[in-house]
Amino acid sequence: MVRSELANSGAAPKIPRPTTLRESVFEAILELIVNGSLSPGQHLAESELAELLGVSRQPVREALQMLSGEGWVDLRPGHGAFVHAPTVQEADQLLAVRALLETESARLAALNSDAAGVARLREVCARGLRALEADDIDASVAANSELHALVTELSGNTVLAELASQVSRRVRWYHTPVARQRGRASWEEHGQLIDAIETRDDVRAAEIMRDHTEHTRSSYLEQRAAEPAEPKEPTPVARRRRPRSLSAS
Amino acid sequence: MVRSELANSGAAPKIPRPTTLRESVFEAILELIVNGSLSPGQHLAESELAELLGVSRQPVREALQMLSGEGWVDLRPGHGAFVHAPTVQEADQLLAVRALLETESARLAALNSDAAGVARLREVCARGLRALEADDIDASVAANSELHALVTELSGNTVLAELASQVSRRVRWYHTPVARQRGRASWEEHGQLIDAIETRDDVRAAEIMRDHTEHTRSSYLEQRAAEPAEPKEPTPVARRRRPRSLSAS
DNA sequence: AAACTGTATACTGTAGGCAGTCGACAACAG
DNA sequence: CTGTTGTCGACTGCCTACAGTATACAGTTT
């Protein structure tokens, strides 16, 4: 194998693998949704998005269908795509499902984890705490997601991990705007969780994770109850006729 | 409302709503996968499928992406679609996830159910038993799925129900070929489950469902252990060069 | 004979275009 | 003035076509 010589030469700068256009478009639109540039209920015209992103309609179509599959947009046949407008009820249900999936993940992680896994958990946890001290909300939220993803990965159940990851992303969307508080307590719970995983105490790990996710859930509900953003308008599905420009908010 | 006169006239033959082509193609390919016409690992060329189904490549592409989203095919960029080849490990993980989701569904159903819901459950259960008596495996399996779907629906958590439905379909694919036995016992457990739901005994309902799904899981594993169809060939990803014809098996 | 290189083929990814359909507004009848 | 019908505009869904790329085979060189 003469090639191995070249293969082992390392220093492979991972050539900018021109990932498929639809994936780039997927990420781009997702970003627009998450950061609020596209408001819930808004109609997404393929042509406009295509022009905005400088691509043809086809990748946009495919990206919209991917988004639909994960619940980010609603696809009404013949009418096109609308940014999904999450109801409070749905958010609550989603949080409940997340609690279920992550609790089981924590339990399995406690049973399957090894020293290396625990070390990685601690590293992420430390990073999250540092971000918290520095008041870097974004980094803190990112570390939070990373930690939860790591727990699901350590569960050893790939299917479970993928499902949890999908659910978590949506949860984060609903939850991020109200996640400012509940920082310190959250990371303390994370520490306890890691302790339980390290000692392979699956029952305790599950218990901590359940309480932890339930805390964020009740925190979310309180927040929503405090400021009922739009109590009316139960389904404001793109009331305005033509959102000519996509630059909302 | 003059229109109500016409609207209430009933007898709406539900005009053959020309559902989008991509959905029809989705169903068609899914059927080909489930019934074994397309074997796991087989490469799916868009052009061939398009010609086979008498449509253009576009709906086929979109259908394949939907299938990819639900885990039926693997989409390798630049290489096209391959029928997903489930490993034993993955099937086991999927069954574990199903157990988790359905157990929670049963618990919630016990808390939320009403008389009407219980009546529907009993109806389906009776239908399943009749099918079993008549040795109608297909009908029995269908009733089984319907019953489980009904339980998740009665849980009141839509998100949970959708997730469980998705997982169940895949489970059924892996499981159907080995589902011949375990008929009688399964339906007896269903009866007990309905009893628990009727009496709103959430703990017992969850317990029964967990045991029930664990039974099918161990049943599946035994079956696989008994006949290790292809112990070798860990990833037979379309080894043959050109599967000219799509009529496999 | 073995390995490398050039060429051919087939398939994917993307673009552009056309017909069908839905919603909205305007004109008209009762 | 209210309800109905005709017409316009826009957008989706689908088809066709082209370019880019990966794979396999054959020819060539060492």
Image (cartoon, coloured by chain):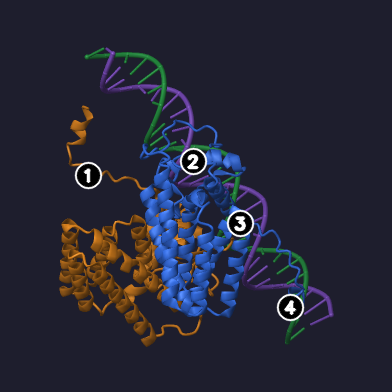
Chain colours: A orange, B blue, C purple, D green
Host chain of mark 3: B
User: How packed is label 1: few (under 14 Cα within 10 Å), some, or many (20 or more)?
Assistant: few
Q: Are marks 2 and 4 on the same chain?
A: yes
Would you name the residue on which mark 1 appears? A13
Would you name the residue on which mark 4 appears? B4
First along the sequence among labels 2 and 4: 4
SS under mark 3: helix
* Camera-side mark, 1 or 4: 4
Would you name the residue on which mark 3 appears? B139
Quarter of the image with the C terminus of chain A is bottom left
Q: Are marks 2 and 3 in contact (CB under 8 Å)?
A: no
> Would you say A111 lies left or right of B126 here?
left
Host chain of mark 1: A
First along the sequence among labels 4 and 3: 4
Would you name the residue on which mark 2 appears? B39
First along the sequence among labels 2 and 3: 2
> Would you say A131 lies left or right of A225 here?
left
Host chain of mark 2: B
